[in-house]
C-alpha cells in the first residue's frame, strides 16, 4: 500500500496503532482540483477540512472597496487549506480557496471529523498542535506587517518560503505582502 502523506505528517506528533490507522484512513476522501478550480467560495460553508497532498492553492478575500484580491495564505504540499472559522462553526466563509496548479487534497467533512476525533481521541492533540503552529505563523505575520518595511517582508518571504516563491506569480506575492506588484518588480531589479 502506498504511504499516506497525511499519516506521515501525523506521525511527527502522535503514534497511531494499525487499527487506528485503518479507522483514520476510512474517514478521508481524495479530490483532484485542476488549475482555477475552487475548493471554497465566499458565501459557502466550508464543509471540508483539506490537507494538500500535492499542488498549490491560494486563499483570498475580495476587497469590496476596490475589488482587489487580498491573499490570506498559500498552501502547498503537506499543508492545510481550509477556512477554520467556517469549518469549525459551520457558518459561511468570507473568503475563497482556489487552485493555482493541479492539486490533490485529502478531505474530511465536518461530521466525519467529529466522529474521527471521538474514534481516535489522541488526534485531538495532533490538531491542537497544528492549530497552535498556524496561530503562531499568523501572529508572526501580523507583527512583521506592523513592524517591518515592505522590502524586509519581501526578502524574508523569499527566504522562508522558497517553494512558494518559485511557484507563485509575483503579483500574488505582492498581494500577500500588502504591496504593489510594481514595488516587487523594483525590488527584484534592485537586487
Image (cartoon, helix red, strand yellow):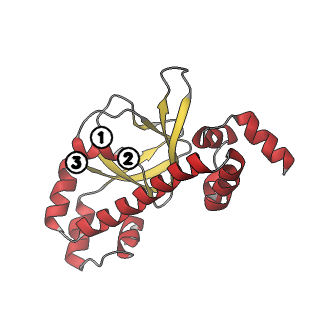
User: Residue at 53% of width from left, 52% of height from top?
Assistant: 143
Q: Position of residue 162 (x, y in %)?
A: 65, 59
Q: Position of residue 32 (x, y in %)?
A: 43, 47
Residue extending furthest toward the front: 147
In depth, the one of 139 and 25 nearer the eye is: 139
* Residues at circles 2 and 1 in contact by the CB criterion of under 8 Å: yes
Disc 3 from disc 1: Cα separation: 10 Å
Closer to the chain start, of discs 2 and 3, is 2
In depth, the one of 153 and 47 nearer the eye is: 153
Mark 3 or mark 1, which is nearer to you?
1
Determine the secondary structure under disc 1.
helix
| Residue 162 shown left or right of residue 89 in the figure | right
Disc 2 from disc 3: Cα separation: 12 Å
Q: Position of residue 86 (x, y in %)?
A: 29, 40
Q: Which mark is residue 86?
A: 1
Q: Residues within 10 Å of mark 2 (few under 14, many from 20)?
A: many
Which residue does the numbered mark 3 point to in the structure image?
A: 110
Q: Is residue 68 above or below residue 184?
A: above
Q: Is residue 66 above or below residue 76?
A: above
User: Residue at 75% of width from left, 34% of height from top?
Assistant: 182
User: Residue at 68% of width from left, 45% of height from top?
Assistant: 150
Which residue does the numbered mark 2 point to in the structure image?
A: 82
- Residue 120 seen in the current view: yes
| Residue 86 shown left or right of residue 115 in the figure | right
Q: Position of residue 146 (x, y in %)?
A: 56, 46
Amino acid at each position: 500500500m502506498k504511504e499516506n502523506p497525511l499519516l506521515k505528517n501525523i506521525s511527527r506528533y502522535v503514534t497511531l496503532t494499525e487499527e487506528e490507522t485503518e479507522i483514520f484512513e476510512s474517514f478521508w476522501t481524495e479530490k483532484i482540483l485542476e488549475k482555477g478550480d475552487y475548493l471554497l467560495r465566499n458565501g459557502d460553508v466550508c464543509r471540508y477540512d483539506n490537507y494538500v497532498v500535492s499542488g498549490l492553492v491560494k486563499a483570498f478575500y475580495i476587497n469590496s472597496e476596490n475589488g482587489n484580491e487580498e491573499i490570506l495564505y498559500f498552501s502547498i504540499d503537506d499543508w492545510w487549506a481550509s477556512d477554520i472559522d467556517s469549518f469549525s462553526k459551520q457558518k459561511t466563509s468570507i473568503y475563497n480557496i482556489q487552485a493555482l496548479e493541479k492539486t490533490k487534497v485529502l478531505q474530511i467533512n465536518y461530521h466525519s471529523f467529529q466522529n474521527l476525533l471521538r474514534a481516535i481521541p489522541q488526534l485531538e492533540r495532533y490538531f491542537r498542535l497544528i492549530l497552535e503552529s498556524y496561530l503562531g505563523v499568523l501572529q508572526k505575520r501580523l507583527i512583521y506587517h506592523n513592524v517591518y518595511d515592505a522590502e524586509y517582508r519581501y526578502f524574508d518571504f523569499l527566504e522562508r518560503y522558497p517553494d512558494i516563491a518559485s511557484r507563485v506569480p509575483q503579483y500574488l506575492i505582492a498581494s500577500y505582502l500588502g504591496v504593489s506588484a510594481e514595488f516587487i518588480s523594483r525590488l527584484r531589479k534592485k537586487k
